[in-house]
Image (tube, helix red, strand yellow):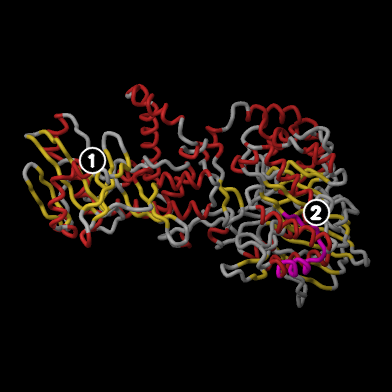
């Protein structure tokens, strides 16, 4: 070992007894231990010894002494090595046992978790090392990091469970490196964990230290090299590195990890060539082991993020691309190419007829609801505050049977109150791998509520592989029970394919997988126009209005003939909501200043304004039949906040939506005007509507910098987006919509 500037070695006592020599941790220096060390070979071969791990280097659990001096000891017996290695160890770096002992003393002195070192002992003959042992305190009831990770992967653990595990291990690895120690064999199996009181794992020991080295300072390149041996799914590994660093990991560290991971993979791939006999034996033995002893296929890893209520991407962008099946992109390309002429013609017609006279808004604003039992009554009361609007309730395949029963009861309660309810069935990877279980899940759910529902949405974000579907053949099998559902519940509307975001080539191909015999009542779509900006912002020349028109044209022309488009999920992430935001990391950085982190959410006032603008563009244009806002209560994106104690707080968006519904629920569109689109500064938008009582009103806002309030917009009164009466006519028009009551301007329908 290299020299150190700490006092860890001063706590050890050298000993020699005949041909045996070594050192003892002063804390364990007893007569019983001194007498036992020369007999250690016999002790670990005794009838009471328990083999923990075999092979060339054996780990054996033994008990040394009795009474108050009894020690539960793990003895690592190192196998014989070549004469050349013995010579190098004798004249340079010491034996593996001595290196393990001194490294453990150092780590213990630096408060790094490792089993307490007891002693090392060895027997030499000249330059040859005949016996070599390292003794440490036996850690009872432990598992390796590898076992804990496999357990979570196979049971589809939640994001909170993964983050707690990764964060604890990352912190210990960082502490180890900060202590000047490089492990050089930091695999998952060399980190021990112990169950804590809250049923989570905490690191209790970094083991197998004999390859390690002490250095004065561990560089970023060395840190990356050491961490590269950890086997963690690629996107989780990026999170692990951020946790390790305590803030977003520096680029040199990321590059070092990637470079050494690639080298390590190449080395693994050549093992059969370098050690053909050993690898053949390992392969034979592996066939007898259960699948839970191995990592799932990358495609089969599925994790639920319980902090933001969505699937968590376990693979980074690079690995996802590598895992895409052959032909996936080609199919989308040729399907889109074939559909493009007719889709484009219909798109131009749909856009030209947007905001036509007589478009009614009744029943077109809807909300998604997912209460828990504790807040159910309060949430239902707040839902009533929005009027009798349609509701969507999700049934997630990965959730418990008791949760499903609770949601079935919720659906019945909502329907009995006169609401139209849609049930959305959300898949996980197991639903795709086991279509029979998925079909049974849906049919058994519908047995209780199928005749109560207005509609079902079949599937969720099927174009995103993190939701479990990787190929179009998988999607085709996924739709296997649709014909049975349609026959069993002929009065039930079926919506799909529920793709997400502006990925219409996939949408076109997905519609082709839908069974021709099953009518699609409406094409459902999760359309987030710009989760970091205004709905009028453009993506490849398409703002919200153009995307709605294109979605409608795709629905109508690609073999389905669907006239209706339903947006079944949309919201904006909220600024400062941390792990609950759908666009931030599912863990908190321990060192970073929150102000220094990129938070792509919006503040609550902006959220309210964007929501109203989105609804106006989608519904008043007539291009979207209904919008389900996701959702009523959620800390990171809901109309209502829920804090850690369960207390609910109405956000501005709740009040804005309440007024929008109460004011426009019975209104019809008369006409509209919108500006020529010029990047991120479009200008003024206005919609003229007429209520059943004869009142004409205008809803107007600006996209881009504030400007003078339009001189031609006159009315008896003016309201802000929350329904508050303004004391006078506004001076400026901003991004937050203004309602002009009893408006005296008629907008030219051709404008």
Instruction: Left or right? Give the position of 247 relative to 617.
Output: left
Residue at left 71%, top 33%? 476
Read off the residue under disc 1. 45
Q: Give the structural element (helix, strand or loop) at label 2.
A: helix
Name the spot of residue 663 as percent of width and height, x first. Answer: 83, 66
Name the spot of residue 690 as percent of width and height, x first. Answer: 89, 62
Residue 717 against residue 490 in the figure, above or below: below
* Measured Cα–Cα span from mark 1 to mark 2: 79 Å
Residue 26 falls in image quadrant:
bottom left
Residue 468 falls in image quadrant:
top right
* In magenta segment, residue 22: no
State how many labels appear: 2
Residue at left 80%, top 38%? 484
Instruction: Left or right? Give the position of 749 relative to 96.
Output: right
Residue 277 — which label?
none
Image quadrant occupied by the N terminus: top left
Q: Pick whichever, 437 or 567, lies toward us.
A: 437
Determine if residue 546 is in view. Answer: no
Name the spot of residue 744 as percent of width and height, x first. Answer: 88, 66
Name the spot of residue 270 as percent of width and height, x first. Answer: 37, 25
Q: Give the structural element (helix, strand or loop) at label 1.
A: loop
Read off the residue under disc 2. 619
Magenta stretch in the rendered image: 378-393
- Tell me which numbered mark, 1 or 2, is placed earlier along the sequence: 1
Instruction: Left or right? Give the position of 357 relative to 99.
Output: right
* In magenta segment, residue 386: yes
Instruction: Left or right? Give the position of 112 relative to 96.
Output: right
Q: In front of the other: label 1 or label 2?
A: 1
Residue 497 falls in image quadrant:
top right
Label 2 packing within 10 angstroms: few (<14), some (14-19), many (20+): many
Residue 502 against residue 612 in the figure, above or below: above
């Amino acid at each position: 070992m290299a020299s150190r500037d700490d006092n860890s070695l001063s706590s050890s006592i050298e000993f020699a007894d005949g041909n045996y020599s070594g050192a003892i941790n002063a804390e364990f220096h007893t007569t019983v231990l001194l007498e036992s060390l020369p007999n250690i070979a016999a002790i670990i071969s005794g009838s009471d010894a328990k083999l923990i791990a075999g092979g060339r280097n054996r780990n054996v659990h033994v008990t040394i002494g009795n009474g108050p001096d009894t020690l539960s000891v793990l003895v690592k017996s190192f196998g014989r090595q070549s004469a050349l290695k013995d010579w190098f160890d004798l004249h340079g770096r010491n034996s593996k046992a001595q290196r393990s002992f001194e490294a453990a003393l150092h780590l213990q002195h630096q408060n790094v978790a490792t089993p307490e070192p007891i002693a090392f002992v060895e027997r030499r003959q000249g330059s040859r090392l005949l016996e070599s042992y390292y003794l440490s305190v036996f850690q009872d009831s432990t598992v390796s990091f590898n076992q804990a990770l496999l357990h979570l992967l196979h049971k589809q653990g939640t994001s909170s469970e993964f983050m707690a595990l990764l964060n604890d291990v990352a912190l210990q690895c960082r502490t180890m490196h900060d202590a000047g120690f490089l492990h050089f064999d930091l695999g998952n199996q060399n980190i021990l964990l112990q169950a804590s009181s809250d049923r989570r794992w905490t690191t209790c020991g970094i083991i197998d230290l004999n390859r390690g080295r002490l250095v004065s300072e561990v560089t970023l390149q060395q840190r990356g090299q050491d961490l590269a041996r950890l086997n963690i799914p690629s996107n989780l590994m990026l999170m692990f590195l951020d946790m390790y660093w305590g803030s977003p990991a520096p680029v040199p560290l990321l590059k070092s990890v990637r470079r050494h991971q690639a080298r390590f993979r190449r080395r693994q791939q050549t093992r059969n060539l370098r050690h053909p006999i050993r690898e053949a034996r390992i392969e034979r033995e592996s066939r007898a082991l259960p699948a839970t002893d191995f990592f799932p296929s990358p495609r089969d890893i599925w994790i639920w993020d319980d902090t933001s209520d969505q699937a968590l991407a376990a693979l980074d962008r690079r690995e996802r691309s590598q895992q895409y099946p052959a032909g996936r992109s080609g199919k989308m390309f040729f399907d889109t190419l074939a559909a493009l002429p007719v889709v484009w013609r219909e798109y131009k017609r749909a856009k030209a007829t947007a905001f036509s006279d007589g478009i009614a808004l009744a029943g077109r604003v809807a909300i998604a609801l997912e209460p828990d039992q504790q807040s159910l009554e309060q949430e239902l009361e707040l839902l009533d505050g929005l009027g009798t609007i349609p509701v969507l309730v999700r049934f997630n395949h990965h959730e418990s049977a008791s949760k499903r029963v609770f949601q079935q009861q919720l659906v019945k309660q909502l329907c009995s109150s006169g609401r139209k309810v849609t049930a959305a069935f959300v898949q996980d990877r197991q639903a795709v791998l086991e279509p029979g279980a998925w079909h049974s899940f849906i049919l058994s759910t519908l047995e209780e509520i199928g005749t109560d529902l207005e509609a079902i949405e079949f599937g969720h974000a099927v174009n995103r592989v993190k939701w479990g579907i990787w190929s179009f053949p998988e999607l085709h099998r996924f739709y296997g029970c649709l014909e049975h559902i349609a026959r069993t519940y002929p009065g039930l509307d079926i919506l799909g394919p529920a793709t997400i975001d502006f990925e219409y080539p996939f949408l076109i191909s997905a519609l082709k997988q839908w069974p021709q015999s099953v009518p699609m009542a409406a094409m459902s779509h999760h359309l987030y126009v710009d989760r970091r900006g205004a709905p009028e912002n453009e993506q490849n020349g398409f703002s919200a209005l153009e995307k709605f028109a294109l979605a409608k044209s795709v629905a109508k022309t690609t073999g389905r003939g669907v006239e209706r488009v339903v947006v079944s999920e949309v919201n904006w992430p909220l600024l400062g909501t941390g792990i609950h935001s759908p666009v931030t990391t599912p863990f908190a950085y321990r060192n970073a200043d929150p102000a220094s982190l990129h938070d792509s959410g919006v503040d609550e006032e902006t959220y309210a304004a964007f929501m109203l603008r989105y609804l106006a563009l989608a519904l008043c244009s007539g291009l979207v039949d209904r919008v389900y806002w996701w959702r009523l209560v959620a800390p990171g994106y809901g109309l209502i906040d829920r804090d850690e104690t369960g207390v609910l707080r109405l956000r501005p968006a709740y009040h804005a939506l309440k007024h929008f519904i109460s004011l426009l629920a019975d209104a019809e569109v008369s006409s509209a005007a919108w500006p020529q689109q010029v990047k991120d500064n479009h200008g003024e938008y206005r919609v003229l509507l007429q209520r059943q009582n004869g009142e004409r009103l205008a809803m107007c806002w600006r996209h881009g910098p504030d400007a003078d309030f339009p001189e031609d917009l006159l009315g008896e009164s003016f309201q802000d987006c929350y329904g508050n009466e303004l004391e006078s006519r506004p001076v400026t028009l901003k991004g937050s919509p203004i309602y002009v009551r009893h408006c005296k301007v008629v907008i030219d329908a051709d404008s």
